[in-house]
Image: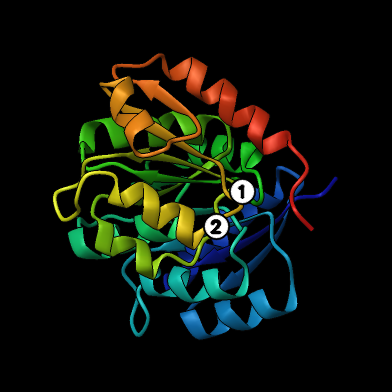
Amino acid sequence: MTRHYLLIDDNEAFAENLAEILRDTGASVDVAHDGVRALELVKEKRYDALVTDMRMPGMSGAEVLHEIRRLDPGVPAVLLSAYSLNEQLRMARRDGLLAVLSKPQQIPRLLKILAAARRSGAVLLVEDDIALADNLSEALCERGLTAVTATELKELASIEAQPFAALVDLRLPDATFGEALQAVESRWPDTPAIVMTAFGQEAQAVGAREYVHKPFDTATVLARLEALYREPKPA
């Protein structure tokens, strides 16, 4: 089955070169050189994945992704950037990313990631331990799943993605104990939430339906997420 990709980059030469590389894999590729055109295309077509540059005139890659999430919450996204823009990157991670790659050195890795990308494969990751969040995000990416990352409670309100599962830490710097879990269950009532904690009694105290002990076996958590991804979704 032909894969359909959207490539968003204001560098026309780079965009067309990358589009040709992707087409050589048998994929169908549409190219947009700005955010406005990208949004028009997303309204017209359902894509298997999108690739966007971060730094563009007008709407940045993070801003484009945020608007696309309103139109198509389930599309996997890869961010390409030659720059470190911390606040923009945090915004993009909240909206859900398969990966952040440097350009143009990581094109072979990009091809592998796109081939594995799965629609509606977002996992909400609520965790203020950046190293743990990064490790989990990388593990999810290897399986074609998207990490939607929030490190603070206040970030949950701006998330447009629709996760099929959530991994939730009970302790966040801007929240009372267990407040993050309550917020996730209130915002996404049909989304199974798995608590990550060092103490099982903590999870039981807040009524967690499922939890894993820190430090946990990542493979076991990924296997559970795979099972949840395969479960029939509510109509």
Please state if 218 lies on the left or on the right of 173 as rendered: right
Residue at x-position 47% and y-position 62%? 187
Residue type, mark 1 in image: Ile
Residue at x-position 68% and y-position 54%? 48
| Residue linked to disc 2 | 17
Residue nearest the viewer, comparing 204 with 139: 204
Please state if 38 lies on the left or on the right of 232 as rendered: left
CA–CA distance in space, label 2 to label 1? 6 Å
| Residue linked to disc 1 | 21
The N terminus - image quarter = top right
Q: Residues within 10 Å of mark 1 (few under 14, many from 20)?
A: some
Residue at x-position 57% and y-position 34%? 112
Q: Secondary structure at mark 1?
A: helix
Residue nearest the viewer, comparing 101 with 99: 99
The count of marks equals 2
Residue 57 in the image: x percent, y percent?
33, 81
Q: Residues within 10 Å of mark 2 (few under 14, many from 20)?
A: few
The C terminus - image quarter = bottom right
Residue 172 in the image: x percent, y percent?
20, 46
Residue 39 in the image: x percent, y percent?
57, 80
Q: Quadrant of residue 66?
A: bottom left
Q: Quadrant of residue 211?
A: top left
As drawn, 191 above or below 61: above
Residue type, mark 2 in image: Asn
As drawn, 28 above or below 205: below
Q: Circles 2 and 1: CB distance less than 8 Å?
A: yes
Residue at x-position 19% and y-position 58%? 86
Residue nearest the viewer, comparing 124 with 144: 124
Residue nearest the viewer, comparing 12 with 135: 135
Please state if 211 lies on the left or on the right of 163 as rendered: left
Farthest residue toward the right? 1
Q: Secondary structure at mark 2?
A: helix
